[in-house]
Image (spheres, grey):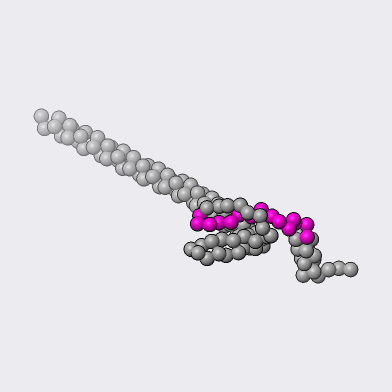
């Protein structure tokens, strides 16, 4: 007999909760201080005089969400790092191209200066 997805999940969930001990150690937050208490699968958070109870499923969901957000942040940081590396490569290529153009212009100016100086010397020799 084949179980539907809903029945399968329900049976796994029942086995999971049946296998867990009735009293677990949980963390209770009070005014940014952490204390440990034993209770039955509930967590209380005191926030400005209000007390909230968080179930084990909610704590699991919060943990999964925080790990997933960390994964996304690491992936975004890696992408940003590779983008910065790519920008450095492109900027380096641009700087090398500018340096090559500047050197070419300086060589052209030096050749022009040599030509002008040679003409000046020739005209001076011809005049005397």
Task: Assess whether residue 80 is covered by the magenta stretch.
Answer: no
Q: Where is residue 66 shown, x and y percent of the image? A: 58, 57
Magenta stretch: give its range: 18-32
Q: Where is residue 43 shown, x and y percent of the image? A: 62, 60
In the image, taking residue 38 as reference, residue 116 lies left or right, namely left
Quarter-wise, where is residue 106 in the image?
A: top left
Q: Is residue 123 above or below residue 65?
A: above
In the image, taking residue 121 as reference, residue 17 lies left or right, namely right
Residue at the far right in the pictured view: 1
Quarter-wise, where is residue 72 in the image?
A: bottom right
Q: Where is residue 16 shown, x and y percent of the image? A: 76, 59
Q: Is residue 68 above or below residue 111?
A: below
Quarter of the picture containing the N terminus is bottom right
Query: Is residue 68 shown to the viewer in this render?
Result: no
Identity of the residue drawn at 38% across and 45% down: 95
Task: Assess whether residue 29 is covered by the magenta stretch.
Answer: yes
Residue at the far left in the pictured view: 128
Identity of the residue drawn at 24% across and 35% down: 114
In the image, taking residue 125 as reference, residue 27 lies left or right, namely right
Quarter of the picture containing the C terminus is top left
Viewer-proximal residue among 17 and 69: 17
Viewer-proximal residue among 67 and 61: 61
What is the count of numbered marks? 0
Identity of the residue drawn at 86% across and 68% down: 2
Identity of the residue drawn at 15% across and 30% down: 125
Q: Is residue 94 above or below residue 41?
A: above
Query: Is residue 25 shown to the viewer in this render?
Result: yes
Q: Where is residue 126 shown, x and y percent of the image? A: 14, 32
Viewer-proximal residue among 95 and 59: 59
């Amino acid at each position: 007999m084949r179980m539907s997805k809903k029945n399968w999940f329900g049976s796994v969930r029942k086995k999971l909760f049946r296998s867990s001990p009735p009293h677990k150690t949980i963390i209770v937050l009070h005014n940014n201080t952490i204390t440990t208490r034993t209770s039955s699968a509930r967590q209380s958070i005191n926030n400005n005089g209000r007390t909230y109870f968080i179930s084990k499923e909610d704590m699991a969901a919060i943990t999964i969400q925080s790990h997933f957000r960390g994964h996304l942040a690491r992936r975004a940081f890696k992408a940003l790092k590779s983008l910065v590396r790519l920008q450095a490569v492109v900027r380096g290529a641009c700087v090398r191209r500018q340096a090559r153009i500047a050197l070419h212009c300086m060589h052209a100016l030096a050749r022009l200066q040599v030509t002008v100086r040679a003409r000046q010397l020739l005209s001076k020799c011809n005049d005397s």
